[in-house]
Image (cartoon, grey):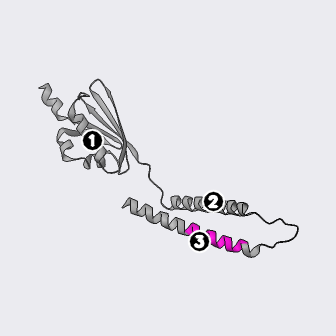
Amino acid sequence: MKAITRNILNIVLFTIVGLAAKAQNNNSTKNKVDTATKVPASKIDKTQAAADNYIHLAEATKSKFKALFPSKPGDTVYVVIAGINYTDPNLKLLKEKIDDVKNTKGLTSTYHNNNTVVKVVYKGGDASKLYDNLAAEAKELFAPEDIEGCRLVLSYKLAKEKEQ
C-alpha cells in the first residue's frame, strides 16, 4: 500500500513539474525579443536553464508534499529484561518478534550482568502498544512487570522457574 501511494505521488509530482515547465517555456518564448544588441542564447545555455528550472520546480513540489504529508519519526521504546542470559535462545526469539512488529526499526540491544536492554524505534505508539502487538509466543515467555510511556520492563518466566 505504501509503495502504491509513493508511486502515485511520483506520477503526480512529475506531471506537475512537466506542466509547469511547459507553461514557463511557453511564457519565456512569447516574451523574448531578439535585438541586434542581444546575443541569442546558445542551445546549451537554454537547455541548462530549462534543467535548472525543472530541478527548482521539483524541489519546491517535493517540499510542499513533505509539508502536506509529514512523516512521524517514531519513539524509541526501551525493553528491559532482568535475569536472562545473553545466549538464551528465548532472548533471540523476543528480539525477532519485536523486530517483526509492524512499524519497528533499528533494533539494538545491550547486556550487563544478566540484564538486557533492547532499544527499538516504534512508530505505532508507546510501549504498551508494542507489547500488545507482540506475537503470543513471546508473550508466553515474557510477562510485563511495568509499562510506562516508552519503557517496558519484562519478567522472564523461565528465569523464575530456574531459581526454584
Rounded to the nearest whole Å, what is the CA distance between mark 2 and mark 1?
A: 43 Å
Residue type, label 1: Glu
Mark 2 sits on what residue?
Answer: 56
Residue displayed at 74% across by 76% down: 30
Q: Secondary structure at mark 2?
A: helix
- To which residue does mark 3 refer? 19
Which quarter of the rendering shows the N terminus?
bottom left
Mark earlier in primary sequence (1, 3): 3
Nearer to the camera, 51 or 104:
51
Find residue 31 and report its horizontal and vertical position in percent: 76, 74
Badge 3 density bin: few <14, some 14–19, many ≥20, Cα 10 Å? few
Q: Residue furthest front?
A: 43
Q: Examine the residues drawn in magenta and state their main secondary structure.
A: helix
Q: Amino acid at mark 2?
A: His
Residue found 70% across the figure and 74% down from its top: 27
Q: Is residue 19 magenta?
A: yes
Q: Start and end of the magenta stretch?
A: 16-28
Q: Specify the quadrant of the image occupied by residue 98.
A: top left
Quadrant for the C terminus, please: top left
Question: Is residue 134 one of those drawn in magenta?
Answer: no
Instruction: Say which residue label 1 marks.
Output: 96
Q: Considering the numbered disc 1 on the image, is that residue within a helix, a strand or a loop?
A: helix
Residue at far bottom of view: 30
- Is residue 3 rendered to the left or right of residue 30? left
Residue at image position (31%, 44%) is 99
Expressed as whole percent of the image width and height from the top left, the position of residue 4 reads 39, 63
Which callout, 2 or 1, points at the residue further toward the start of the chain?
Answer: 2
